[in-house]
Amino acid sequence: MTMTSQVSHQPIKFPPHFIWGAATAAYQIEGAWNEDGRGESIWDRFTHTPGKVEDGSNGDVACDHYHRWPEDIALMQSLGLQAYRFSIAWPRILPQGRGQVNQPGLDFYSRLVDGLLAAGIEPYITLYHWDLPQALQDQGGWPARATAEAFVEYADVVSRALGDRVKHWITHNEPWCISFLSHYIGEHAPGWQDGAASLRVAHHLLLSHGWAVPVIRRNSPGSQVGITLNFTPGDPASPSAADWEAWRYHDGYSHRWFLDPLYGRHYPADMVADFTAQGFLPEGMVFVEAGDMAAIAVQTDFLGVNFYTREIVRNKDAADNLPQTVFPAPRSEWTEMNWEVHPDSLYNLLNRLHFEYRPPQIFITENGASYADGPDSQGQIKDERRIAYLRRHLTAAHRAIKNGVPLVGYFGWSLMDNFEWARGYRQRFGLVWVNYDTQQRLPKDSALWYQRVIAENGF
C-alpha cells in the first residue's frame, strides 16, 4: 500500500467547535424581484437585457426562497447544518439605495433570522453579494465615492435591525468580481469594460468595508466582522522568468490588490506600476484620500475564503519560456464550470494566508463544484463527483489546520441549485437539487454525505 492510500484512509476529525454550514446569495435564490417594495438591482437590469446571460434567464423567481424560506430552514435542519451564510438584498432594504427604509424587506430577514435561531442554526450575514440598487448605479455606481457612503448607511440600517441576534457579519463578497470581473472584463453586472473604473470600484469597496466595520460593531455588540475574498491561486507553467513574471501579475491583480491594503500594506507598488503602464491610472491614485488606507486596514475578526480552482499561468508571448512543466489534472477531473479540481491549491492558499497575512481566524465561506447529476428513476441523485470534490478539499483543509492555520469553519457552496449569474441555470452547485418548474427540493447524495460529516465532525 502506498503512503498516499494510507493517508487517504485515515479518519479525519476536525477541531471541537468547528462550524459546518452552507451558503447562498440573495439574488441567486430569493426571487420576488419586485414584491413588497423591493427596488430594482443592477442584476435585475443586467439579466433583463438580452444577451447578458447564457440561457437568457434571470433571477425573477430563482428558487422562490422569499416565499419558501420556512421549508428551506427545515431542510437545513434536517441536514444538521450548524450555520447558514446568506446575503441581504440591499434594494429590498433601501429601494433607492439610501433614505427611506422598506420595512417589509427588513421584516423578511428578521423572520428568517428568527427561524434559523429557532432551528439551532447560526446566521452568518453577507451585506453585499453584488446586487447594488439600480438607483445608486444611475448616480455613478461603485466608481463613485458616494456609493461607499451609501453602503455604510445600509450597513447601519441592517445591523441596527438584526444586530441583537446576528453575531457574524461579512461586509462584501468577492471584491475582485465586483471590480474587475464586472467593470473591466464585463462578464457580470453592470457589464462595464473600463480598467480605470475597476480600480475606483475596488478602492470604494474596500473603503466602504473599512467604514462599515465599526458601525456594525457598535450596533451588534460582541459580534465578529470580516470580509470574504475569492482566490484562484496560480502556478507558473514552467520555471522560466517569463512565466514567473506572469504569475506575479496574476497574483497581484487577483489577490494582493485586496489583501495588502486590508492588512495594512497599502496597494502593492508593483501593481500600481503595472496598472499605470496599462493606462488604468491616467491621473494616478487620485481616488485615495487622506485616511482611506487606515480605514481600510481596520482590524477584523476573520477572513472569508472562497476557493474553487487554480490557474496555471503561462506567458505565451515571451521569448525566454522554458518547456511547460506544470500540467492540469485530466479533463475527467474538471467540473462542469470548466474548472480544474486541485485541492492542493486550497492547502497552499490557506497556509499562505496564515503565514503571510495572519488573519485571526479563517472561514472557508464558499467551496463546491458544479455537476449536473439529477434524479434517477428512484429519485436518488448519485453525485459521486461532488462527494469526491468535497472530501478532497476538506482533507486539504484539515492538513492546513494541522499546520496551525486558524481555520474555524466551512460553508459548502451551495445549499441548493440556483441562478449561477451569467451562466444562468445551466450550472448546478447545490447539495440539494431544485426542480425549477415545481420548486421541489431533493437532497443529493452529497447532502447526505455532508450530513454525516457534520454529525461526526469529520469522516
Image: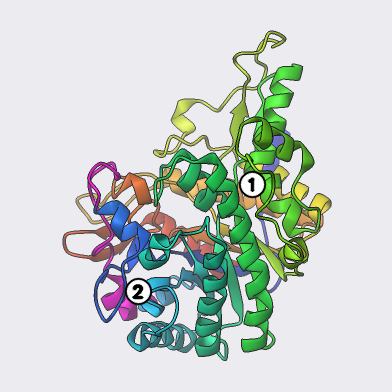
Q: Is residue 250 above or below residue 224?
A: above
- Counting from the top left corner in percent of width and height, residue 352 is at 77, 47
Camera-side residue: 19 or 148?
148
User: Which secondary structure lies at badge 2?
Assistant: helix
The quadrant where residue 131 appears: bottom left
User: Which secondary structure lies at badge 1?
Assistant: loop
Circle 2 crowding by C-alpha within 10 Å: few under 14, some 14–19, many from 20: some
Identified at 69% across, 30% down, the residue is 247
The amino acid on which the numbered mark 1 sits, given as a three-letter code, is His
Is any atom of residue 1 visible in this view?
A: no
The amino acid on which the numbered mark 2 sits, given as a three-letter code, is Asp
Q: Nearer the viewer, mark 2 or mark 1?
A: 2
Q: Is 457 included in the stretch rendered in magenta?
A: no
- Counting from the top left corner in percent of width and height, residue 380 is at 29, 55
Q: Quadrant location of the C terminus?
A: bottom right
Q: Which numbered tag is attached to residue 9? A: 1
Q: In the image as oriented, which residue stretches furthest toward the left? A: 437
Coloured how? rainbow
Tell me the CA gap for discs 2 and 1.
34 Å
Describe residue 67's horizontal placement relative to residue 135 as left or right: left
Q: Is residue 156 above or below residue 425?
A: below
Q: Determine which residue is flagged by label 2.
A: 72
Q: In the image as oriented, which residue stretches furthest toward the front? A: 283
Identified at 48% across, 64% down, the residue is 23
- Counting from the top left corner in percent of width and height, residue 291 is at 76, 66
Q: Is 57 included in the stretch rendered in magenta?
A: yes
Q: Is residue 414 above or below residue 89?
A: above
Describe residue 371's horizontal placement relative to residue 50 as left or right: right
Give the magenta part as a residue range: 49-73
Is any atom of residue 39 visible in this view?
A: yes
Identified at 47% across, 39% down, the residue is 185
